[in-house]
Structures are given as C-alpha cells and as structure tokens.
Image (cartoon, grey):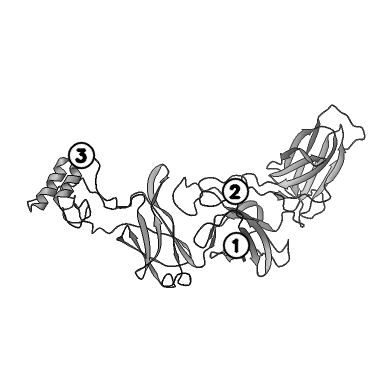
Amino acid sequence: MYLRLAAFILVAVVAALASRETADASLTISGTVFEDNDHDGVRDPGEPGMCCWRVEFWRSGELITSTSSGHDGAYTFLLGPGGYTITLVHTRDALGPCVDSFGGLSPLRLDDCLGPSEVDWPVTTDDSVDGEITDQPVTIDFGVREPDAAMVLGIALLNDGYPPVGTPVEAYVGAQQCGAATITRTGPGAHTFELLVLGEGEIAGCARAGKPVDLRVAGVSDTSVYLFNPGVRFTVLHHILAIPDHAWFWSQEAAMPGTSIDSVVMALVDGKACGDATVVGSTVFGSPVVGFIRLTVPSEAVEPGCGHAGAEVRFEVSGEPTGTVLPWGTAVQYADLHLPEAVVKGDLDCSTAIEATDALHILRWVAGLPRLVPDICPTLYDVDCGGSPESVDALYVLRWVASLEVSLPAGCGPIGRSGP
C-alpha cells in the first residue's frame, strides 16, 4: 500500500554512467540511503545512514528486483544492463511492537510479535531516477527526510463489540482530518488497524508532537488518549476504545471456584440485569483458564436503569452472587470473579443442605461413574483433604447427616462450613 507524502524529499545522485551498453555482464549497483538534513541531495558530515529502506528497480511498470539498506544505510546488489526507474520505500522491517501473551481472554490480546508492518512508507516521487545502467559500476545515493508522521496500530473496540472489516478508522485534530485507514481484521489476537497519522509538517493544522489526536472508529471517538509522537522508525501501539456508552468487562482465572465452561455471568446495576456473558476456556502459557472476553454494560442512555456515573456493577455466576463490585465507566476493566466462601463444605449438589445424596456423589466419583453435580458448585469431594476423593469422604458426610462426630485433619476446615 503506497501512501504518498508530499513533504518527503528524495534526491538520487547517479554517478559513473558510461555510454556503452553490454548485454551479458551483471552490474554492481550500490549506494547509501542517508538522512538529508539540509535537503541539498548531498551527504554531508554528520548525516547518518538510514536502515530498512527498500530500493526498487522497475522497468515498464514491472518490479525487476529490490533490496534493503542495512543499519549503516548501505545497500548492494547485481542488476543486468538496461533502462530502469528507481524508487525508494521505507518498510520499517520488523520494528512493530512485540507482546507475548500466548493466549488468554483479554479483549485487547496480542498473541505474539507483530513482525513487519503491512503498510509501507513511500518515498517515491514523480521525478524518480531514470537512466541507462551500463557496464560500469553504478553508485546511487538517496537523501531522504523523515516525515512528520507516526504509524499507530492496535485493536479497536466499537460500542459493545469489535468493528467489522472495512470500518473506517480516522485521525482528526479539530475539523482537520490527519489520517485515514480501515479495519483489516476483527477480534483479539492481532492488531486490527494500522493508521498513518500526519503532523502539521505534512498538512497544516494537523498533529503536533505531544498533543492529543482524536482517533475515531466509524465516527465514534476514542475514550482513551493518544498523544502524537512522530517518527517512522518505530510503531506506536495504541488501542482505540470507541465505547462512549459502554463499560467493557473481562475475566480470566486459572482457578475460578464454581465456574465452568458455559456458565453464565450476569452483570447487575442496582439489581437490574444489564449484561451477560458465557464462560469459555482458554490457555495461558499452556495452562488452562476459564473466563470471558466480553461482558458489556450499556449506559442508561442506551438502556434505562443501567450504567451511569457513580454506578456500581455487581456480578452473578449462574445465579450465585459473587463478591465482586466494580465501578461503571467507559473503559475496559478486569473482573476478578470468585464465589463467596459461604458455599458449604460437603454440600456437593448445592442444595443448601448436606444430605445422604451428597455422599452418593462422592461414591459415584470413586467408582468412576458420571457425577450428577451442577457445574456451578465447588465440588469438594475430598472432604478430609486426603489428596483424592475416597469412600471415607462419603462416610464423613453420612456421619455429619446422622449428627455423629466428624473429626477431620487440622487445617482441612470443618464440614458444614465453608471449604478450605
């Protein structure tokens, strides 16, 4: 994708061009891409070489070959004789951000190093160098000026979900548009947009270093703050949270007591159900976790009686209240959901009473038969904390039901009360 920037300055100096062509020898083409600070087209002392710019040789509209400048700005390759058009493009190589989460349920998850950008920095101008490459070694130096621009990439959220592919992403300073792109993929796991933001050096009235820029998705402004930091050599990682009327919650627990896949998590504001999510499974560094990626709670402007400034959001898991309380706000928040410890040890079927049927559940476990216990319950089959469910655990339950003495190991927690 080529995006022309008028303020890029490209000067190519072609030296040692002879007049005689040859049809057989390969020619050495070399040179340097350097930062032309004074814009005179000549490399002066103190003007450094520039890495990661791609030199392209074209003939009749077809790319013949290309190579990239090294860390010192130098490049070299072989080319057959003939007439070529030479252009220069900044690829940024693999300078994108690298975030190693390796899975998980964060809605803003980046699974691995992003690698090369999919948007090239063009420096091609209408006066690209045309010349007859002859049998003599050719030196072509490129003097370039970095643009007043920045590349921003990340994940975009829009209201209560992820925007579909093709949704416009724009940058504004006041009424002046300073960049435009589209959503290229959707959902967590990799960046969903790459946006070139231009500074006032490119377009009058655009971004200034250190000043905020209004990033928009489908015309909806980002609720977080992006400050313009120009420079093409490194990418800025910034997630656009275009969620002015929604609070977005997510959760990820390696051990969320009482919660299993397909459990339903409900969000309540002043007792009113304002959003829900279904628990799913994932892994983090190879370890299983359960939780949810998206539980959105709309504002009262969207759903009367729901979110507003100062409101508290409470959570239930399959009808069981948790002890988690979070403020409503237009942001992405982590919800640490644990059922309260009032669930009674020994009440394996969550019937609110310890019965002989609870002992039956343990015996079925020991026998390898299907358990008939709701997934929402913390299934404390190992009543005596012996390390595994055994028939003796069922005996402890039966003794408690019969009002007989139950002596469990110290530290295991008494039966009839919350578990250890």
**Tag 1: amino acid:** Ala
Residue 137, quarter of the rendered image: top right
Assess disc 2: are there few (<14), some (14-19) or many (≥20) residues with their C-alpha within 10 Å of its C-alpha: many
Looking at the image, is mark 2 or mark 3 earlier in the sequence? 2
Say the numbered circle drawn on residue 366: 3
Front of the two marks 2 and 3: 3
Assess disc 3: are there few (<14), some (14-19) or many (≥20) residues with their C-alpha within 10 Å of its C-alpha: some
Q: Nearer the viewer, residue 157 or 16?
A: 157
Front of the two marks 2 and 1: 1
Dot 2: what SS?
Answer: loop
Is 294 placed left or right of 9 in the picture? left
Dot 1: what SS?
Answer: loop
Cα–Cα span, label 2 and label 1: 25 Å
Q: Where is residue 123 in the image (x, y as percent from the top left)?
A: 75, 50
Q: Name the residue under label 2.
A: 96
Assess disc 1: are there few (<14), some (14-19) or many (≥20) residues with their C-alpha within 10 Å of its C-alpha: some
Q: Where is residue 13 in the image (x, y as percent from the top left)?
A: 84, 45
Residue 325 vs 73, above or below: the answer is: below
Cα–Cα span, label 2 and label 3: 53 Å
Q: Where is residue 51 in the image (x, y as percent from the top left)?
A: 69, 45
Query: Quick check: can you spot residue 389?
Result: no
Is 393 placed left or right of 307 in the picture? left
**Tag 3: amino acid:** Val
Residue 242 vs 292, above or below: the answer is: below
Cα–Cα span, label 1 and label 3: 57 Å
**Tag 2: amino acid:** Gly
Looking at the image, is mark 2 or mark 1 earlier in the sequence? 2
Q: Name the residue under label 1.
A: 218
- The answer to whether mark 2 and mark 3 are in CB contact below 8 A is no
